[in-house]
Structures are given as C-alpha cells and as structure tokens.
C-alpha cells in the first residue's frame, strides 16, 4: 500500500495553494530546493505528475487537483483526531462553541444557563466566526459545537438538531420603494443590488462586499444595497430601516451542529441542554 506522510501532504497542499514554490517554501520555513525535491519524491512514489512546471508558471494536473481536494480533508481529519484525543484525555477541557455574531436567535444565554445545571458542565468558550467558515471550525477541531444556519451552512459530515425555524425578511432603507409593502416575493427583488458575502464563493449579490451583518446594515442605511436575512438577525430593527417578510423565500433554521464522529459526554450534555431550551422557548403546538 502506498502511503503519504502528513508532513509530505502538508508540503504538497502548500504548493498547491500558492502555485509558487518560492512562496510555499517561505510559508513552510524550508529551503526551496528541499521543497522541490520533496514534491518530486512524492510524484515518484505515487507514480503520477502533480504539477506542470515552467520557469514562470506552476499548475496543478488533474491528479494534483484530486489530491488537493481529498488531501485537505485528510489533513483536517488527522488534526481533528489529534485534538479530540488530547481533549478526551483532559478531564478539565473546555467546551468550545462557534457562531457568527448575533447568530443565536436569542437562545445562547438560556442554553448556557441550562447547560450550567448539568452535573458535568464545563466552561464554555464562545468563538465568533466569519460569514461562511463555521463548518470549518467543526471539521478541523477548532470548535466542538456550533450554531449554524441552514440551508446556508453546509451540514455534510455533521450531526445536528434544529433549535429554531424562522422566516426571512428583506431589509431596506425607510425611503425605499418597497418600504411600504407588507410582504414581498423574491421576484420583487430581481433588479435590486444585493451584497457579496466575504469568503462565500459565488455569492448571490453584485453589490459591495460585506463581512458581517453590521457592515450589511450600514450599507443598507446609506442606500448602497438591500439584504435578505433570517428575521432574528435584525431584531430589533435599526432606526431608519424597514424589514419586510419575503413570502416565497425558504425558511431559515438555526441548528446546533457537531462532528458526526464526536461522541464525548460533554457534547451530549450540551445537546441535552440545548434541546431543553428549545422546548421551553418553542413548545409544541397542542
């Protein structure tokens, strides 16, 4: 069986990301000739060509693209396995929760309060993510649990429980042509400028790039764009802005998610607290 060491995989992925041996060598803190030799050894051992090289250009082959895609996940899995093993051996390990700022639908405080009553509760470290990288925190082991929004966040490889379902609203300045409407449809927004979310490939909008809801609301307030968000992310509604329900937009679900292979008791205890909080805040209809 042909094997690839994690160190060698890291070398390959760095060159694949940079597409430049000099910059990759600087990032790895090794000499460029040594890095070039390491890549050639990998290609010889695997019997494939990973890069097309010229004096001015480095390009991935089809085989290189495949190794980049699957190798990234493999390296993340190894890192996560090491972190999980270390945390499993540490009985005082904190529980790390990732979410985007304001992305808790008002449930974070009651969940933490409920969790604190668990007999084996740990300290919870709250971590804030960018607009689209919460799943990365969970997959690579930087966080244990996360509050994610479906269908916007990719839940592949994660176990999850829905905590809250809500409609989506369009946010417009008070003087906007839609401000007086009681509801709109997505077709009503066809000619409007929507944001491009930083770090989200192929985002919806053609307008200025924004990194979080605060930036989005500022840009809406100065009439540079409009935005569509889950209702809880704009509660309360800032002065000068108007929120209108979008009747045909798919509902948004706030979910608690964790790695599908993580069965540690501290995860189960936090999930139990979250589900109890869900029942208390959103009891089932009689």
Image (cartoon, grey):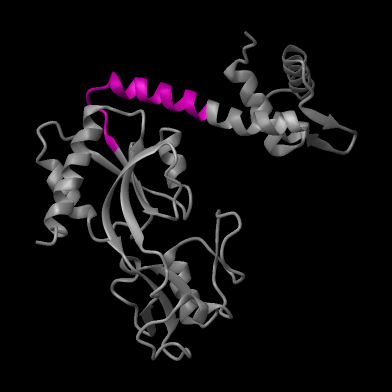
Is 273 situated left or right of 51 in this image? left
Q: Quadrant of residue 86?
A: top left
Quick one: quadrant of the N terminus? Answer: top right
Indicate left or right for 11 with 104 as reference: right
Q: Is residue 181 above or below residue 167?
A: below
Report which quarter residue 160 is drawn in: top left
- Closest to the observer: 253 or 22? 253
- Magenta: main secondary structure: helix
Q: Is residue 76 left or right of residue 32?
A: left
Q: Is residue 30 above or below residue 254?
A: above
Residue 64 lies within the magenta run: no
Q: Position of residue 162 (x, y in %)?
A: 28, 50
Rendered residue at 62%/34% (across/down): 69
Residue 38 figure quarter: top right
Q: Position of residue 117 (x, y in %)?
A: 9, 41
Image label count: 0
Q: Position of residue 151 (x, y in %)?
A: 42, 55
Q: Residue furthest front?
A: 286
User: What residue is at 22 percent from the left and 56 percent from the top?
Assistant: 107
Q: Residue reaching furthest right?
A: 55
Residue 256, horizontal then vertical, whole percent? 30, 46
Residue at point 9%, 61% (across, down): 286
Can you say whether 220 is above or below 18 in the image? below
84 in magenta: yes
> On screen, 277 above or below 250?
above
Q: Which residue is at 16% across, 43% downward?
A: 273
The magenta segment: 75-95
């Amino acid at each position: 069986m042909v094997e690839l060491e994690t160190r060698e995989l890291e070398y390959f992925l760095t060159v694949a990301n940079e597409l430049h041996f000099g910059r990759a060598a600087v990032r790895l803190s090794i000499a460029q000739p040594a890095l070039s030799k390491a890549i050639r050894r990998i290609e010889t051992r695997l019997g494939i060509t990973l890069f097309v090289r010229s004096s001015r250009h480095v390009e991935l082959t089809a085989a290189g693209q495949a190794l980049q895609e699957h190798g990234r996940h493999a390296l993340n899995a190894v890192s996560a396995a090491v972190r999980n093993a270390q945390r499993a051996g540490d009985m005082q390990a904190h529980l790390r929760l990732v979410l985007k700022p304001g992305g808790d639908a008002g449930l974070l405080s009651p969940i933490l309060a409920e969790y604190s009553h668990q007999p084996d509760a740990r300290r919870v470290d709250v971590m804030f993510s960018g607009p689209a990288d919460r799943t990365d925190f969970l997959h690579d082991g930087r966080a244990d649990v996360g509050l994610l929004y479906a269908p916007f966040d990719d839940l592949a490889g994660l176990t999850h429980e829905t905590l809250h379902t809500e409609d989506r609203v369009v946010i417009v300045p008070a003087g906007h042509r839609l401000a007086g409407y009681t509801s709109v449809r997505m077709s009503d927004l066809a000619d409007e400028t929507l944001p491009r979310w930083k770090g989200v490939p192929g985002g919806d909008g053609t307008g200025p790039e924004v990194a979080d809801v605060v930036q989005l609301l500022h840009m809406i307030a100065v009439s540079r764009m409009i935005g569509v968000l889950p209702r809880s992310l704009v509660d309360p509604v800032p002065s000068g802005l108007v929120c209108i329900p979008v009747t045909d937009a798919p509902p948004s679900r706030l979910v608690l998610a964790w790695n599908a292979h993580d069965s540690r008791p501290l995860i189960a205890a936090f999930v139990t607290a979250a589900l109890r909080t869900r029942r208390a805040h959103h009891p089932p209809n009689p």
